[in-house]
Image (cartoon, grey):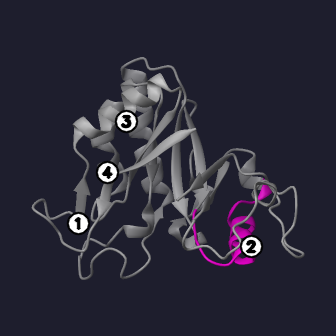
C-alpha cells in the first residue's frame, strides 16, 4: 500500500516563482511520511514539471529519500516548453530519455552520497507513447527501479490497448509497469482486479503483462 501524493501540482497561473507549480508544505509531507512509516505504507512524491526539467523538479524531493519508504514519480503530461506560450494542460507534455536519465542520475547520486541502500522506485506517468520519447535510450541504474505507469482514463478496452502498446515484453525485462484506475473518469463498470491483472478479458481484449503498480484515483 502507498500514499501517492502530488508534491508539485501544475497550475494555469505561473505563481510567484513563475514555474506554474504549487508545492505542498513540508510539514504536510512529513506528516504523511511518518504516518506511512507506522502503518508500513510506502510514499510516492509526484512532480508535474510545469516549466521545470525532470532533473530540476526532483531536486526538492531528494531530502525526503532519507526515509526509506519514499519514492519519486515524474509526470510529463503538464510539462510546458521553455517559450511558455501556453500553460500546462493546453497541449500534451513530454520529456526525452535524456531528461529522465539526468533525473535518475541525480536521485542515484543522492542515494550513494548518503549511503541509502534501499532501492527506490522512479515512476514515469504516461498514456501516450510520445510522452516519453526515445525510450530505447533510457538508462537503468542499480539503485533505482524504474516504473512506467500507464495512467490514462476512458474506455476500458482503449486503456488496455494503450497499456499493451507502451509496455512491451522487451521493456518488461528491465522496467516494471503500472496501471491506473479512475473512479469517476473511467468507463463503468470499472475493471475488476482480475481484468487489471490480465487474468480475465474484456471482450477479446486483455492485459498481456501483469502490472506491478496499481493505482486508484
At x 44%, y 77%, the residue is 92
At x 27%, y 65%, the residue is 51
The residue that mark 4 highlights is 57
Q: Are marks 1 and 3 in contact (CB under 8 Å)?
A: no
Q: Main secondary structure of the magenta part?
A: helix
Compute the Cα span from label 4 to label 1.
Answer: 12 Å
Compute the Cα span from label 3 to label 4.
Answer: 20 Å
- Mark sitting earlier along the chain (1/3): 1
Compute the Cα span from label 4 to label 2.
Answer: 30 Å
At x 70%, y 65%, the residue is 163
Tell me, for residue 32, which label it has, or none: 3
* Residue 187 to residue 124: above or below: below
Other residues around mark 3 within 10 Å, as few (<14) / some (14–19) / many (≥20): some
* Residue 11 to residue 46: above or below: below
The residue that mark 1 highlights is 20
Out of 120 and 160, give the one closest to the viewer: 160
Task: Provide the secondary structure element on which disc 4 rests.
Answer: helix
Compute the Cα span from label 2 to label 3.
Answer: 35 Å
* Residue 185 to residue 33: above or below: below
Out of 19 and 160, give the one closest to the viewer: 160
Residue farthest left in this picture = 16
Task: Provide the secondary structure element on which disc 2 rests.
Answer: helix
Q: Is residue 4 left or right of residue 208?
A: left
At x 37%, y 24%, the residue is 66
The residue that mark 2 highlights is 161
- Mark sitting earlier along the chain (3/4): 3
- Mark sitting earlier along the chain (2/3): 3
Q: Are marks 2 and 3 in contact (CB under 8 Å)?
A: no
Amino acid at each position: 500500500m502507498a500514499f501517492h501524493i502530488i508534491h508539485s501540482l501544475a497550475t494555469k497561473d505561473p505563481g510567484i516563482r513563475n514555474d506554474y507549480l504549487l508545492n505542498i508544505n513540508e510539514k504536510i509531507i512529513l506528516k504523511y511520511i511518518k504516518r506511512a512509516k507506522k502503518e508500513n505504507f510506502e510514499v510516492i512524491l509526484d512532480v508535474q514539471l510545469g516549466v521545470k526539467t525532470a532533473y530540476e523538479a526532483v531536486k526538492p524531493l531528494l531530502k525526503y529519500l532519507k526515509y526509506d519508504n519514499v519514492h519519486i514519480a515524474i509526470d510529463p503530461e503538464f510539462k510546458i516548453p521553455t517559450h511558455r506560450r501556453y500553460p500546462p494542460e493546453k497541449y500534451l507534455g513530454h520529456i526525452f530519455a535524456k531528461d529522465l536519465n539526468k533525473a535518475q542520475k541525480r536521485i542515484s547520486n543522492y542515494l550513494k552520497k548518503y549511503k541509502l541502500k534501499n532501492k527506490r522506485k522512479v515512476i514515469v506517468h504516461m498514456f501516450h507513447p510520445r510522452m516519453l520519447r526515445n525510450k530505447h535510450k533510457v538508462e537503468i541504474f542499480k539503485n533505482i527501479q524504474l516504473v512506467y505507469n500507464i495512467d490514462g482514463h476512458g474506455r476500458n478496452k482503449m486503456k488496455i490497448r494503450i497499456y499493451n502498446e507502451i509496455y512491451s515484453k522487451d521493456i518488461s525485462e528491465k522496467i516494471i509497469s503500472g496501471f491506473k484506475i479512475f473512479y469517476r473518469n473511467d468507463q463503468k463498470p470499472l475493471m475488476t482486479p482480475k481484468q487489471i491483472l490480465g487474468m480475465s478479458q474484456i471482450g477479446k481484449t486483455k492485459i498481456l503483462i501483469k502490472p506491478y503498480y496499481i493505482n486508484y484515483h
